[in-house]
Amino acid sequence: MQGGSTGIGYGLKYQARCISDVKADTDHTSFLTGTLSLKEENEVHLLRLSDGGTELICEGLFSHPNEIWDLASCPFDQRIFSTVFCSGETYGAAVWQIPELYGQLSSPQLENIASLDGHTSKLRCILWWPTGRHDKLVSIDEHNLFLWSLDTSKKIAQVQSQESAGMRHYLTGGAWDPHDFQTVSLTCDSSVQLWDLRTMKKTDSIDRAHVRNVDYDMKKRYMLVTAEDDSGIHIWDLRKLKSPVADLPGHSHWTWTVKCNPTYEDLILSAGTDSAVNLWLASPSIHDDPVKDSLLTSQNRTEPLLNSYNDYEDSVYGLAWSSREPWIFASLSYDGRVVVESIKHHLTR
């Protein structure tokens, strides 16, 4: 099903790649996004959907000193988030805090509460402990995996352990298993690597070239979704990694990112450099047990592509489901355009 965007838009001043759901904000549907300007001072925007769901409001605008290549919101404190940033050839990462009374300040400033120093290779992303209050963070650079202990009250982050993936592997990102908190999946140029954080060792791998992004199915244990340059989207059962258990066509150009819905089973978003966002329903047959009480209409089951949102003028790099209202998602195209969409009409009334 093809269709233009009918969502609510918001324009950033500069180009951008990353957007994050503010999971800890249980009172509002909120997103954080950061810009990627080479010449100008960059910005972090705190966006909130109005109570009526008709307007996307900028609740806070904060200066950020460098280009933002990764942004992730803290799962237990809505005013805390992390960024990976770049200045020239130098990469860094930090944990930031939004001032408590930012709405009453004329020029609110972000507070750097911890710098994640120690990386010597190009930083890729920061992963937060998947749910609840916890002090662990993971940072990933091109060759290394770092496990951190973060104390937000003392404003300090300490390296607990680190390990190299080897100079032959160029890491590009990763995801933290929401069902097994000791496991992370790392993407690299030739495979997806599964790592145990207790031993800091690789335990298994999926040999696939050009995997751009991975995400875990939030509702089904052992299910991992990968986005690949040329071969679309694959769904894997982590207990049998020789071949995927399901495939989705992906995009007409590179499939850049995938996001599994936090509440509704089998719902997957993908975005790519073809300037489109696709909403998929993965086949329920990939699971061990039949899907019961599905929230999706039966006529949608034979066609995996539920909708394609193609009213974009640039590549779409950022996607985020709302944890508070899981029928809502935000997308971010490289030209700085944020669009919030509702998929409620795809759900059984």
Image (cartoon, rainbow, N blue to C red):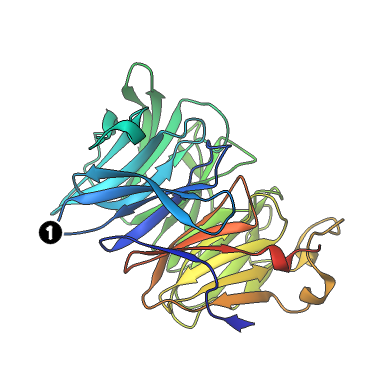
Q: Tell me the residue at 60%/57% (across/down).
A: 328
Name the quadrant of the C terminus: bottom right
Q: Position of residue 112 (x, y in %)?
A: 26, 31
**Depth check, front residue: 48 or 133:** 48
Q: Tell me the residue at 31%/22% (across/down).
A: 156
Residue 57 visible here: yes
Badge 1 density bin: few <14, some 14–19, many ≥20, Cα 10 Å:
few
Name the quadrant of the N terminus: bottom right
**Depth check, front residue: 50 or 209:** 50
| Residue type for callout 1 | Lys
Residue 37 figure quarter? bottom left
Q: Name the residue at the top extreme.
A: 154
Q: Position of residue 69 (x, y in %)?
A: 30, 53
Q: Horizontally, is 37 left or right of 320 in the view?
A: left
Disc 1, SS:
loop
Q: Tell me the residue at 20%/48% (across/down).
A: 66
Q: Horizontally, is 203 left or right of 121 in the view?
A: right
Q: Horizontally, is 40 left or right of 345 in the view?
A: left
Residue 169 figure quarter? bottom left
**Depth check, front residue: 189 or 235:** 235
Q: Horizontally, is 291 left or right of 64 in the view?
A: right
**Badge count:** 1
Residue 238 visible here: no
Q: Position of residue 28 (x, y in %)?
A: 55, 42
Q: Which residue is mark 1?
A: 39
- Is residue 238 positioned above or below 307 on the image? above
Q: Position of residue 269 (x, y in %)?
A: 57, 64
